[in-house]
Amino acid sequence: MSSRRLLPIIVGALVVAAVGGYVVYGQQQQEQKTKRARGAQDQPAPVLAARATIADVPIYLDTVGNTKALNTVTVRAQVGGQIVRVGFKEGQDVTRGFVLAEIDPRTYQAQYDQAVAKKAQDEATLANARLDVERYTRLAASNSGSKQQADTQKALVAQLEAQVQGDQAAIDNTKTMLSYTKILAPIDGRTGLRLIDEGNLVQANDANGIVVITQVRPISVLFNLPQQQFPQVNAAFAKGPLEVDAVAADGKTQIDRGALQVIDNQMDQTTGTVRMKAEFPNANLQLWPGQFVNIRLLVDTLRQVVVVPTAAVQRGPQGTFVYVIGDDSKVAVRPITVTQQDDTRAVVSDGAKAQEQVVTSGFTRLSNGTRVAVQQANGQPQDAAPAATPQGPEAAQGRRKREGGEGEGKERRRRSENAPAPSTKQ
């Protein structure tokens, strides 16, 4: 047969062989994949799990509040004059009645003394007029004097008595003005920056004032809540005081704990919120006027409910569910009803029981009936302890065998090193 006829036959045979080899190779690869998949399915899926527990779960409403001093007073002078003494330090805690500053009192002291002297003068005149009334009354009774003169003297006595009362009012007024020369703290609180220095002249009700005092123990926080949450808060507030926590920026650290004081009497139509006010003891001065702070309002507490980690709650087309681990280490898909949930735990009203194990991580390979192996957070199997080094007689015997084997090996190496080199002669 010629080479031209053999060449197509050979090429065709090679092509058929290549295709057959490729098909066989593909079948082998598919079989290996199937074996690996079966092997993977036979291996339990590693998961993390936690047990459902019974606990009391508080229900909080979270918002942001603005801290405000319970009382703020701008202390102003009520009389004019020169400041002769400043009795406080900036940032000092003062009590009601503390002398903050003094105004030169000499002018007001003189006015007071003058009013006292005027009253003494009028009282002396009144005393003389009363004696004249007695005389004129006796003379009129014996027809030795006119009755008109006695009546006129009585009117004069009444006039002088009214004048004495006016003098007393003038004394009270000048005494009050004199007391205003000592500027007193009207409330307990902390002083701010001094607004005027010693030696300056002040006027009554000066707009700048002497100092601003803020009451920071206790302190108040104003915050808003959406109108949708108002019925829940209002119903809880009607039953008794509600606890309010001031929380740090991390959302966990509690700064202070207070109580809700007031719910505003109207909604804000522009924002659809209602304003509320809480009061905090602020014993450690952690809250400061003007500070923004996270607020948690406790409106209710769910008693003795089933709780699972939030990570265990899964969602599908049929709603929420969890993977429950049975005694045979197989998971079962369990539909649940979640009534309350936060970042860490969820309250389950139906579908889970206390002490049941639920999967919290490793959902990729899970389906109904999948066998699982519960792992610890560090990747080790749960309840697995590290193998301890055996210390019994068998361990000692094995150690002697190892030591003996090592000794024999060293001896053989030493003999081979000391052995004479083989001869190279033929």
Image (cartoon, rainbow, N blue to C red):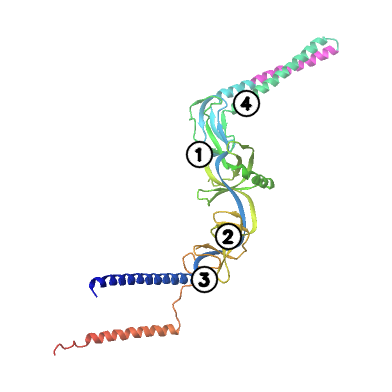
Q: Is residue 354 magenta?
A: no
Q: Which is nearer the N-term, disc 3 or disc 1?
A: 1
Which residue is denoted by mark 3 in the rendering?
383
Q: Residue 37 or 241: which is nearer the viewer? A: 37
Mark sitting on residue 321: 2
Quadrant location, the C terminus: bottom left
Q: Nearer the viewer, mark 1 or mark 2?
A: 2
Please give the name of the residue rendered at 53% of the width and 44% of the height, measured from the top-left corner: 293
Q: Which residues are magenta?
A: 117-141
Q: Position of residue 246 (x, y in %)?
A: 56, 47
Q: Nearer the viewer, mark 1 or mark 4?
A: 1
Q: CA distance from mark 3 to mark 2?
A: 27 Å
- C-beta proximity under 8 Å, tags 1 and 2: no
Please give the name of the residue rendered at 39% of the width and 83% of the height, measured from the top-left corner: 399
Q: Nearer the viewer, mark 2 or mark 4?
A: 2
| Residue 44 can be seen, yes or no | yes
Q: Residue 194 or 276: which is nearer the viewer? A: 276
Vertical relation: 283 (above or below) 128 = below
Q: Which is nearer the N-term, disc 1 or disc 4?
A: 1
Label 3 sits on a secondary structure element that is loop
Vertical relation: 415 (above or below) 221 = below
Q: Amino acid at mark 4?
A: Lys
Q: CA distance from mark 2 to mark 4?
A: 81 Å
Q: Position of residue 178 (x, y in %)?
A: 59, 26
Which residue is denoted by mark 1 in the rendering?
91
Mark sitting on residue 175: 4
Label 4 sits on a secondary structure element that is helix
| Residue 221 can be seen, yes or no | no
